[in-house]
Amino acid sequence: MNPAADSPRLLSVESVNVSYGDAPALWDLTLHVDEGELVSVVGPNGAGKTTLINTIMRLLPVRSGRIVLRGEDVTRMTATQMCNRDVSIVPEGRLLFGQMTVEENLDIGAYRALARTRRAETMERVYGLFPILKERRWQLAGTLSGGQQQMVAFGRALMAHPKLLLIDEPSLGLAPSVVEQVFQAIHEIHRSGVSILLIEQNAVRALEAASRAYVLEGGRIATEGNPRTLMAQPAIRAAYLGEAVHP
Ligand SMILES: Nc1ncnc2c1ncn2[C@@H]1O[C@H](COP(=O)(O)OP(=O)(O)O)[C@@H](O)[C@H]1O
Ligand SMILES: [Mg+2]
């Protein structure tokens, strides 16, 4: 083994085009996530954020371009194959099974063989991260608060033992105190060695959390870079941080 030959590049999306029928949603989109990074993609409603994350998870077909995971071309793979390559998603709207208990929802995340063998240990880890879920483990997921449902969605993704976690709008519709808890969990997951691609409309929180960021507008990357530099740009402040621009 030659360690110098190991690329830190975990994921690269290379000139990817995605359409819904004839309507293009992503245009020549290029971005990457290196091992250990927490990368944010921010952008307004309808920019293509969910399309991007669902494309990476291989839930949508790629019209042209490539997706590469640890040097392997995964453009034509399925979501199950992505899961087996240590990629998990916390989807927009959580997509829980409301008529199943918290623990049953978590179990669904432990579907693959590797995860099943470590099920009990991982579940304790999830309950350590979100103690309220342990108290409510026999409760039907549909009867939980929005914040608790988001915690279940995170827990389910973690049950699969991801190395790359794709998170779509985790703060959507949550009270500020719950948003705080969710972002603390994101940091804890990141510290435990999971690389993260975080998609958010809440640009302030997402940029504060990230080591690198992209701004997505109209299906295209409008700008990218260090989150602090981005936050200092007047156009970004005006568009995403709700500040008036003074000429
Ligand atoms: N299933 C779909 N069928 C057709 N168009 C869609 C579908 N999902 C999203 N779109 C369109 O693609 C664009 C990007 O949507 P989306 O990825 O959901 O944006 P975001 O997550 O940034 O709000 C929007 O113009 C949206 O209307
Ligand atoms: Mg979305």
Image (cartoon, rainbow, N blue to C red):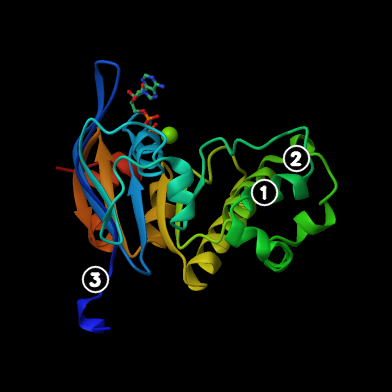
CB atoms of marks 1 and 2 within 8 Å: yes
Give the numbered dot on residue 7: 3
Q: Is residue 247 left or right of residue 73?
A: left
Mark 3–mark 1 distance (CA, rounded to whole Å): 33 Å
What is the three-letter code of the residue carrying label 2? Ala
Count residues near mark 3 (Cα–Cα under 10 Å), then give few for <14, some for 14-19, many for 20+. Answer: few
Between the C-alphas of marks 1 and 2, the distance is 8 Å
The one nearer the camera, 91 or 186, is 91
Residue 168 seen in render: no
Residue 36's quadrant in the figure?
bottom left
Residue at left offset 25%, top offset 75%: 6
- Residue on which the image places disc 2: 141
Disc nearer the start of the sequence (2/3):
3
Q: Judge whether residue 165 can be spotted in this image.
A: yes
> Which residue position holds label 1?
152
**Residue type, label 1:** Val
Q: Which residue is nearer to you in this view: 104 or 126?
A: 104
